[in-house]
Image: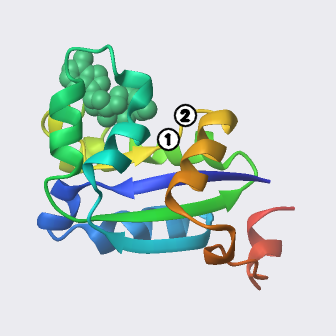
Amino acid sequence: MERTLILVKPDGVQRGLIGEIIARFERRGLKLVGMKFIQMSKALAEEHYAVHKERPFYNSLVEYITSGPVVAMVWEGKDAIAAARATMGATNPVTAAPGTIRGDFGMEIGRNLVHGSDSPENAAKEVNLFFNEDELVDWNRVTDAWIRE
Ligand code: DAT
Ligand code: MG
């Protein structure tokens, strides 16, 4: 089982797309194990985006992600990381496929609505950054047998 950290970024929150975005992960068959609505601090944003520290867009990334509240979630499932990223679509919404979150709701890279972890290593780091172990819920979902054989 994999776990991935998903954020509904401030544009998704401001545009009233929280439910729309969550629904896509939910109906795909990923299982929600953690969720919170928070205003990220600059320190948390800098740590979250530490891998991009040397990139020219780093400062605007930190500014964007702290510009309003976000919904932070942990979704679980076999291949959860790749499945979630496919549901999100390509980083640049202009080239993201229609049917994906970014392809359906986005128009530029600096307002791409969602974050999703990109590897098991980064997912573990990011989940720990946003959630304590006791904030993640271990639960049985009755539909699992109809989602996985
Ligand atoms: P993703 O969010 O698809 O994992 P990433 O990790 O490469 O993409 O980059 C993190 C965020 O940084 C991305 O969501 C939007 C922004 N970004 C990436 N490449 C960019 C670029 N060339 N110009 C401006 N912003 C960029
Ligand atoms: Mg990334």
Name the residue beneath numbered marker 1: 85
- As helix, strand or loop, the secondary structure at mark 1 comes to helix
Ligand 2 has an atom within 8 Å of the beta carbon of the residue at disc 2: yes
Which residue type does callout 2 highlight?
Asp
Q: Is residue 29 left or right of residue 2?
A: left
Badge 2 crowding class, 10 Å Cα cut-off, few under 14, some 14 to 19, many 20 or more, is some
Image coords of residue 88 (percent x, y): 40, 45
Name the residue beneath numbered marker 2: 118
Image coords of residue 120 (percent x, y): 68, 37
| Residue 96 seen in render | no
Quarter of the rendering occupied by the N terminus: bottom right
The front one of 92 and 67 is 67
Q: Residue at 12% across / 38% down in the picture? A: 107
Q: Nearer the viewer, mark 1 or mark 2?
A: 2
Question: Vertical placement of 130 versus 119: above or below?
Answer: below
- As helix, strand or loop, the secondary structure at mark 2 comes to loop
Q: Is residue 3 left or right of residue 98?
A: right
Question: Vertical placement of 13 versus 51: above or below?
Answer: below
| Disc 1 + disc 2, Cβ < 8 Å | yes
Q: Residue furthest right?
A: 149
